[in-house]
Amino acid sequence: MTEVLPEHPDFLWRNPEPRRRYQVLIVGGGGHGLATAYYLARNHGITDVAVLERGWLAGGNVARNTTVIRSNYLWPESAGIYEQALKLWEGLEQDLGYPLLFSQRGVLNLAHTPQDVREGVRRVYANRLSGVDAEWLDPVQAKQVCPILNISPELRYPVLGATYQPRGGIAKHDHVAWGFARAADALGVDLVQHCEVTGIDIHSGRVTGVRTTRGEIGAEKLALCAAGHSSVLAAMAGLRLPIQSHPLQALVSDLLEPVQPTVVMSNTVHVYVSQAHKGELVMGAGIDSYNGYGQRGGLHVIERQMAAALELFPVFARAHVLRTWAGTVDVTPDASAILGLTPVANLYLNCGWGTGGFKATPGAGWCYAHTIAHDEPHPLAAPFALDRFSTGALVDEHGAAAVAH
């Protein structure tokens, strides 16, 4: 039976004129910004909130990601916030009353070298200590989970095993944003589209409002939440963030019958693939090496990605590329997010998620809303404070959790 999906919600075409002052302004109308607004209203009763988006709601990175959801990160700080997100994902459709097409089909992280194996087994044990579901599979067991996987020992990068998180999976990215936006709208939050922030007003070390293309708007609290452009916004407040922005590429194939039953990721050959609900293969690669804000990347990255994918999945040779794209991701030195307070009073940061932003959406929104409401970090967000880059208390996920998507 074919599932009938709802029309786009009406609020996407409503664009209220912003009022002159709000209790909380959120800059960025993507998944994290909308989730933060929803949890501010639902969890903390703060509804005097406006989400400012320079384009249209969900028109940025949330609609350009590859929808992978998992929580099997190595370090307990990362596992904590991603596991919180995964627990929220498991009840989010009912909470928002909107079909997110959340599918817990499992996530395989392949190991191709002895070092991959050591890292994978270590991560499985670390996950279990953190209460995260995790298994180590040998090549035959990995092929049982994903029958089209090539485990021939003759491969350039043979499959020596894999970590497996059964509760991981995918969701429909734009539906996630629409679901949060609908729910926030119903609770009284203003969603203001085509409203670009051009400046941040600060007096006596405290945020007082923003300047926008739709006029000046006062605010008691200002929360920055614009993936890919966080450093640009922070600079308006005199903050220099330890962030680099890079294009991150992905692609989809034409529609196929169901062939890919789970999400498969490989760090050594740097490719990951799942199959969307409509049937297209969704595939991604690493970030382009250069800095930039472009929404397209270098063709050589896609070529290397396809070569790796065809070794692991020979059946994909009969598929055709339908379209490619890129989104801009913010990357910190330790490949972990910045979430919390800043040196400027009543100015808050949610940025630097790199390739992990989508899977963190409900958890990040939950913790960010708590931080804004109470003016102190949520316990799960505390390790991701901006000052860790001066204290040295890094949460270094570089290479620690296979492909970071």
Image (spheres, helix red, strand yellow):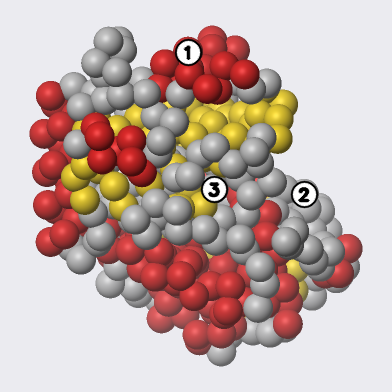
Q: Secondary structure at mark 1?
A: helix
Q: Residue at x 21, y 51 (%)?
A: 135
Q: Earlier in the sequence, mark 2 or mark 1?
A: 2
Give the foreground label among 3 and 2: 3
Count the labels in the image.
Answer: 3
Q: Residue furthest bottom?
A: 45
Residue carrying label 2 = 55
Whole-percent x and y of residue 248? 53, 30
Q: Is residue 153 above or below residue 182?
A: above
Q: Would residue 362 be visible to someone looking at this image? A: yes
Q: Residue at x 49, y 34 (%)?
A: 273
Residue carrying label 1 = 307
* Residues packed near mark 2 inside 10 Å, few (<14), some (14 to 19) or many (20 plus): some
Q: Would residue 198 be visible to someone looking at this image? A: no
Whole-percent x and y of residue 392? 17, 45
Whole-percent x and y of residue 121? 13, 42
Residue carrying label 3 = 67
